[in-house]
Image: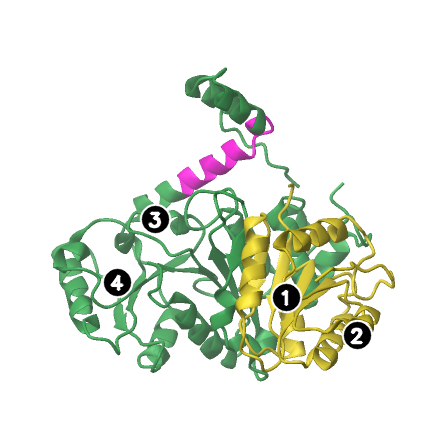
Chain colours: A green, B yellow
Amino acid sequence: MALDIKGMRGVRLSDEVQSASNGSRRSIARVLSSIENGTLSLSQALESLSPIVGEVDGWSIMAITGAPGVGKSVLVDALMSRWAHQGHNTALLAVDPSSPRSGGALLGDRVRMTSVDDEAIKERVYVRSIATRATSGSVPLIVEDMAKFLVAIGWNRVLIETVGAGQSELRCAAVADRIVVVEGPARGDGIQAEKAGLLELADAILVNKCDLEGAEKHASELKESFGLGAGEAPPIMLTSGLTGEGIESAASLLHDLPSSQRAKRARMRERLLAQHERRLTSHPLYNRVMEDLAKGTLDIEKALMTLKGENHERSG
Amino acid sequence: MAQPLRIVVAKPGLDGHDRGAKVVARTLRDAGHEVIYTGLRRTAKQIVETVRDEDARFLGLSSLSGAHGHLFPRVCEELMSEGLDDVIVFGGGIIPHEDREALFEAGIKAIFGPGTPTSEILEFIDQASKMDDAGVGQGNEWHWTSKA
């Protein structure tokens, strides 16, 4: 059934997957669309691939998250450029929000990307814009499958840039091996750094825009705050996307970033919740249950009973 | 709508006026589509690589500099040489009526001038998306005729 992409050109998906793994950018883009649209599952996609040799050590999928406007896109662009120059195939899945009203989205992360135009490295840089569509949270869970497909065909560094995220937005923990939180200067007083949330899950923290006043103070407040708790603090670094200060050392630190041992339970919690949400929303009866809930002919308790959370996704 | 359409909105060449492009991008977004905006001053090659990597079904080109007669066909040629024959291309900006026939011949399926109601652009997108041979290199001679 899942044989024609867009039902247009009669290209078999298994051929498209093969051609993607041979490096065709157009096929990579089309396979990612099929995964995103649910016409191809990750396991189906991987089935037609030969197993990868020489898997990379360390991480393959890193989430870059933080509040809107702290400079995630520019930082990500600088990181990709460094890593691609070192010979790594580096991909970015850049997530922007869908309008809850129309379902549409304006995906503007490319505007700030220069690495995709750099003739010396552009073969090793892939950028794909993704809208959140119907999911809650700063990263749709399907992005994990898209990232894993890219890893499987040799893009061994995949970055996920989340929607600008608030303190309690932890969903990126469910899709990435490493989490980097980007902060800006003057992000509130010392108490903000004490608050629980996203920062607790960070494997590293970049305090960006360090060319502006307040960045150093914020970084030292963060360090102090982590010093009060148990366990090792994540590395905290100052960077400036504008002047390039700190970028070189951030790129080499993040390249070999170990996973923080803190907050393991919190990470697993995000994975569990994300998986549960995905099972509910991919249940064959989901749309009908939603309609009945909206009409008032079904209550939440019965709805949960109906959708029970078994795995109804296509397998193999 | 089942799946949102992915549409790249691009500014080829050197002109720096993007209000029109932004209005179109916003209109398409509000109609439920996923719009990838390239930013200003892109080369034909950069635009085509964006369309390819983003798996866009439509490409909208905006030009107010008078260089459309050169830039738009260049983009169409690049699309075809990348094998992206099925991408549907439309354009807008300051484009005199006497220039339009050549652009249609290059494979562009609609040209929208100043004063076009945004609803007309959506009608075009809707109609073209239902065709399976409206792509730039698919040889269909149909094109949208705009009043503006």
Circles 1, 3 touching at the beta carbon (< 8 Å): no
Q: Nearer the viewer, mark 2 or mark 4?
A: 2
How far apart are the alpha carbons under marks 1 and 4? 54 Å
How far apart are the alpha carbons under marks 1 and 2? 15 Å
> Can residue A301 be seen in the rendering of this structure?
yes
Along the line of sight, which residue is nearer the eye, A8 or A54? A8
> In the image, is residue A273 part of the stretch drawn in magenta?
yes
- Name the residue type under label 1: Pro
The location of residue B121, given as percent across then percent down, is 67, 55
> Which residue is under mark 1?
B114
Taking the image as shown, residue A76 lies to the left or right of residue A288, namely left
Q: Residue B98 carries which label?
A: 2
> Which residue is under mark 3?
A169
Residue at the image point whose x is 51% and y is 20% from the top = A295
Report the span colored magenta.
Answer: A271-286
Q: Which of marks 4 and 3 is in front?
A: 3
Q: Which of marks 3 and 2 is in front?
A: 2
